[in-house]
Amino acid sequence: MKFPQEYSYRSENQIHYIAVLIPLIKTKCPPLDNFAKLEADVKKIFGKISSLNLRNFPIPEIKTIQPVFQTLKTGYSAFPKVDPICKNSIGFDSPDTWNFLEAIRSFSGRNDLLVIKQGANYRLLYEHAAFDIKSVLTSDKDLRFELQKTYNYEPSDDKPAVLEADAKRVVSKLNSLPVLKQTVERTCSFSGDINSQYKDSEIYGNFKRLLGDWSGSEYQTDAKKTSIFRLFIGAQAIPLFVEVYPYRNGSKVIYSSGSFKYTVDSTGKVAGVTPADVERAIAQIKKVIND
């Protein structure tokens, strides 16, 4: 027993808890593929509960330990807040949602430790003890970890001092947790309108000659000429929607691009499309209109 009034068992490297007083199965892992097998195991365990002699079980205890604190500098405050291409807000996963299960497990000197994430907090489950680590997000978006002052202990050959020392060892290393670079995928598009001194037929002809058609959606009248042309943003070909109208002694051109994709990482690096690629594409549109 790891906790008061609960029995536990392990199957296929997974741990399950079965409440004695309430017939409720609480799995700490994704459901097994063979649920019928799990169900049969649970029924078998419940069938034997009435015959248990609880006097033979050690009584779980609540012990106290000196709290241990550690802070992980996440660098989150330096993550870019604005998309360098679309200029709108960009959000990376908050540090209190990051998962350090495997890294925390590696800090232990024991083989019987199982680490469970509970919201932003962590629980260290040893064979005969359970310690809780509270995680708090600071104003700088750093993570402050605290080993809680009470823990559950089941009397055994594992002495409390030995288990406490390992839990403290784990927490003392939390400032060295690996902060992984995050990457988010973004989509963007742009639009604009330009007045030109040139005739609508001349501008429209330039688009056809210099960019080429994207699809057979051409429409022309004396009052309006519209089509979809092919525009490159870096190595990506995207549609460019263009409308040309006679306007005063020249023309008005209204354009809008299809969406294009790129990624931004937590260091501010952009991949797939760069701000310079977008600037070149818009400059090309202006050149087609005004040349």
Image: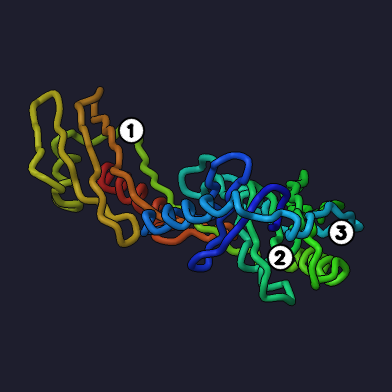
Q: Is residue 97 above or below residue 203?
A: below
Please tell me which of labels 1 and 3 falls first in the chain.
3
**Mark 1 / mark 2, whichever is N-terminal:** 2
What is the crowding at mark 2: few (fewer than 14 residues within 10 Å), some, or many (at least 20)? many
CA gap, disc 1 and disc 2: 66 Å
Q: Which tag, 3 or 2, sits closer to the chain's start?
A: 3
**Which tag is nearer the camera, tag 1 or tag 2?**
2
Q: Are marks 3 and 2 in contact (CB under 8 Å)?
A: no
Give the quadrant of residue 286: top left
Whether residue 118 sits left or right of residue 234 in the image: it is right
The residue that disc 3 covers is: 68
51 and 129: which is toward the camera: 51
Circles 1, 3 touching at the beta carbon (< 8 Å):
no
Picture coordinates of residue 216, whole percent (x, y):
8, 43
Query: Which of the two discs, 1 and 3, sits closer to the camera?
Result: 3
Can you identify the residue that label 1 sits on? Answer: 193
Mark 2 is on which residue type? Tyr
Callout 1 amino acid? Asp
Between disc 3 and disc 2, the foreground one is 2
Q: Secondary structure at mark 1?
A: strand
What mark, if any, has residue 126 been given in the picture? 2
Spatial CA span between label 1 and label 3: 61 Å
Residue at 24%, 30% (x, y): give it. Answer: 251
Q: Which mark is residue 207?
A: none
